[in-house]
Image (cartoon, rainbow, N blue to C red):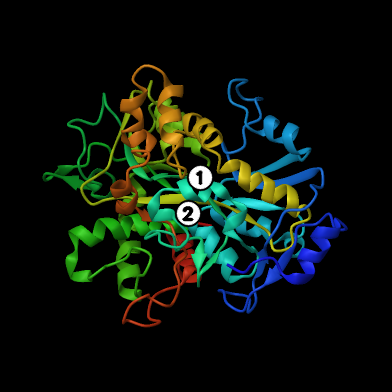
Amino acid sequence: MRRLTTACAVMAALALVAAACGSSSSTGSGPAAPKVYDSIGTTEGALKLIAWNGYTENGSNDPNYDWVTPFQDQTGCKVTVKYADTSDEMVTLMRQGGGSVWDGVSASGNASNKLIAGGNVAAVNTSLFPEFANVISPLQPQTGTNNSHYVVNGQVYGVPYMYGPNFLMYNTNVVKPAPKSWDITFEPTLNGQPNPYSGKLTAYNDPIFIADAAVYLKTHNPALNITDPYELTSDQLDAAVTLLQQQKPMLAKYWALYTDEIDGFNDHSIVAGTAWPINLTYSKDAPAAAVIPSEGVTGWADTWMISANAPHPNCMLKWMQYTMEPKVQAEVGIWYGAAGSNTKSCDLIAKGLGKGGAALVNSVEYSFCGNVGFLNSLYLWKTPQAACGDDRGSTCMDYSVWSQKWTEVAGA
């Protein structure tokens, strides 16, 4: 990463600026010279965030979970949050006013790559964030093997936050024996009989869910030669869409807001479907459990990213520093049921859960926190692009085609 530019260093030394210093780089994806934040100046007193529900608790939902108020007290940055239900919504919000309305976003990979390519978010100098030293190895900015959702052309666009799988959740009283495959959610017949769960299934309402169908087909239709569920040719994409069209009549509903699935499990109108860890946390009385099916699962690794035109950049950079702290990620992990990217958060999550906490942290509910092999097994969300990423060249279908196909499957 580039260091502080001379002009910016002089201004910082004279303490004449309140805004964070940014420089330009000659590399990057999207803009020819992406903005790079090199230092943190005087905080502006306000911070405007776009986030997933559960990522910015201030004690109003439960007084025992509040990591926003301590940040406000430490920095003087008053936090305002707009919650989004989908990655597409996050991208739209981040682009409002040319990117000058919101300071940052807790972007998943299917949003982060679009924001990077569009020049909507800035890169950061990793030296601003000492906790990078404790980030789990696959997400490390320079040496990570599963970081393409926020590291592009050597530039680091943000800081890792939480990660987890999109696993199969099921009602243990109804779905017997415990499922080992996604077939119970995709196939109209099981063992030669009509699928007994048809009409009580659910799926995630987002174009990125096409990748889940591709993961299933990768195992069950090897002739398609699917290698990466986000790098699909026209024929491969059409096969995934056909599978999703086959699935749709078996669904009770699609969900985007996570509480919709929780409500469905708790009123027993839904008995199985793809889910996030937080959905399991609040569906256990259904009773519900989760499994990683034999075909594998998609997943998400969320990144706090700063707008290239952030109105309060210093507060945002301070927030990014704060959210990398193990104590903060432990609080989020316990509340949300996810794993923190900072490996030092795992023991804190176990302690915070009390008796049996160590076993829970080493389970699917908490994403086997700190387990490199598990994180590397996830097909982490990323934005489909025309360039396949291999010797097929630009023969893959980009996100605009995925969106069109999803509309055809799920409806506008």
| Amino acid type indicated by mark 2 | Asp
Picture residue at 43% right of the left edge, 54% below the top = 139
Q: Name the kind of residue labelled 1 in the image.
A: Ala
User: How dense is the environment of label 1, judged by Cα within 10 Å: few (below 14), some, or many (20 and up)?
Assistant: some
Q: Is residue 4 left or right of residue 130?
A: right
- The quarter holding residue 155 reads bottom right
Q: Is residue 188 above or below residue 35?
A: above
Q: Is residue 199 visible?
A: no
Distance from the alpha carbon under mark 2 to that under mark 1: 7 Å
Disc 1, SS: loop
Query: Which residue is at the front of the view, 402 or 250?
Result: 402
Q: Residue furthest right?
A: 16
Q: Residues within 10 Å of mark 2 (few under 14, many from 20)?
A: some
- Using the image as rendered, state which of residue 85 and residue 378 is in the foreground: 378
Task: Name the residue carrying label 1.
Answer: 256
**Residue 334 place in picture, x, y as percent:** 47, 29
* Quarter of the image that includes the N terminus: bottom right
Rendered residue at 26%/23% (across/down)? 173
- Say if 329 sits above or below 403 in the image: above
Residue at horizontal 83%, vertical 54%? 18
Relative to 191, 295 lies left or right: right
The residue lying toward the viewer, choosing from 321 and 335, is: 321
* Residue on which disc 2 sits: 206
Label 2 residue SS? loop
Name the disc covering residue 200, or none: none
Q: Are dots 2 and 1 in contact, CB under 8 Å?
A: yes
